[in-house]
Image (cartoon, rainbow, N blue to C red):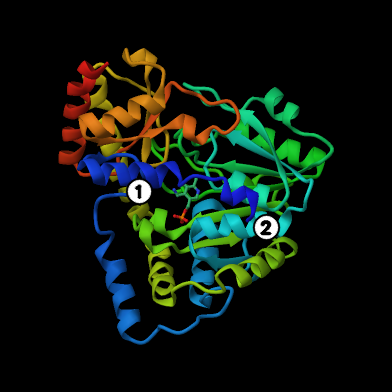
Amino acid sequence: MDPVFASLPDTIFDEMSGLSRRHGAINLGQGFPDGPGPEDIRARAAEALMGGLNQYPPMRGLPELRDAICAHYALHQGLDLGVDEVIVTSGGSEALSDALMAVLSPGDEVVLFEPTYDLYLPVLRRAGAVARFVKLEPPGWRISEQALADAITERTRLVVLNNPHNPAGRNFDAEELGLIAAACVRHDLLALSDEVWEHIRFDGKPFLSLMALPGMRERTIKVGSGGKIFSMTGWKVGWVCAAPALIDPVSRAHQYMTFTTAPALQAAFAWGLAKPPAWFDQMRAGFQRSRDRLAAGLTGAGFAVLPSEATYFLCLDLAASGLPADDDAVCRRWVAEAGVGSIPVSALCPDQPVRNVVRLCFAKSDAVLDQAVERLDRARRLF
Ligand code: PMP
């Protein structure tokens, strides 16, 4: 048995969703909206499905989706991608795994920012690589130049960035991204930029793709997710964008990992990506309202809410909320005794756990958010 995977538990997301089901709790743990998704995009997929688009599409993805991805990023992020620089995958997850498998060799070192999305570490280890962590500290979760410099050695091959960042809710600014770009150029490193949350960002703050920074066009592998952009996380249609020298090996990994992805869903997202910019603004505004509603409710109930610039998540500072700084224990009691599922951020810190922060998903209806606040308020008597 392979020791990397054999020793791993189920992810915290699946565990907390399972506990939420078992206890009949409101699930603010795993990140998914509670709506059915945009009706016009679902109709498009249904039409494609009934129209017979059901056999293997091209390995690199439907040409119409690859074209739509190039046009979308040209319009929204000023990127100049050619269709040969894009492949479609079964979700951002497969895209990330393909990229890690394609570029890493045994002994390579990889810089990860902690807290870290849970997929990166096991997959890079399976590729024989070794992680070096750069700690992000609440409440600001800023990237520090010194911490980044300390994590880079002569064996470093790759920096993995998640921007916007789950669970910190950061939309990293030009200065922080500039630090990463400068380090990549100076040390001749590749970057894997997990940008699945690129459209879910708030307060009018723009999103800057790492690929758009000077010196990064040829060394960045950019990952996106239609499931995130269109609020249908179960569809698992993602993509990878990179210069030909990088995308070709990534496409070989994809070829043997899944080979293709449901064509009817690809066709529907191709159509969706061409929606006017106002549609994306409106989608963001909806999530921003939900963020503000949950933040206001929790603040009113005496919880210390950390700022959230992006993603479906906001975090709570436990100690500042008058709760024990033991996120795992608090989350387990909340789901079993208060009826609210959440995610302990220490589960996303394999190196030096932050134990004082809990992540909550606000991509839910107003009624669900209000009820969760009520339950968490009542649960204060548990501690
Ligand atoms: N990266 C990050 C940072 C994520 O939060 C997620 C989904 N939670 C993914 C990748 C996976 O995306 P997908 O569902 O498209 O596989």
Q: Which residue is depicted at the point 78% across and 50% down?
A: 106
Q: Residue furthest bottom?
A: 52
Q: Which residue is depicted at the point 36% across and 16% down?
A: 324
Image coordinates of residue 1 in percent, x first then y, are: 63, 56
Q: Quadrant of residue 239?
A: bottom right
The residue mark sitting in front, 1 or 2, is 2
Mark 1: secondary structure: helix
Which label's residue is closer to the chain start, 1 or 2? 2
Q: Nearest the camera: 364 or 318? A: 318
Q: Nearest the camera: 345 or 178? A: 345
> How many numbered marks appear?
2
Q: Nearest the camera: 160 or 172? A: 160
Label 2, on which residue? 101
Mark 2: secondary structure: helix
| Residue 278 visible in the shown view | yes
Please indicate whether residue 107 sits to the left or right of residue 28 in the image.
Answer: right
Mark pair 1, 2: CA separation? 35 Å
Q: Nearest the camera: 265 or 71? A: 265
Label 1, on which residue? 281
Q: Which residue is depicted at the point 57% across and 59% down?
A: 95
Which kind of residue does numbered mark 2 sit on? Met
Please indicate whether residue 178 sits to the left or right of residue 155 in the image.
Answer: left
Q: Which residue is depicted at the point 71% across and 65% down?
A: 249
Badge 2 crowding class, 10 Å Cα cut-off, few under 14, some 14 to 19, many 20 or more, is many
Badge 1 crowding class, 10 Å Cα cut-off, few under 14, some 14 to 19, many 20 or more, is some
Cβ at disc 2 under 8 Å from ligand 1: no
Image coordinates of residue 253 in percent, x first then y, are: 65, 66
Cβ at disc 1 under 8 Å from ligand 1: no
Which kind of residue does numbered mark 1 sit on? Asp
Q: Residue furthest right?
A: 154
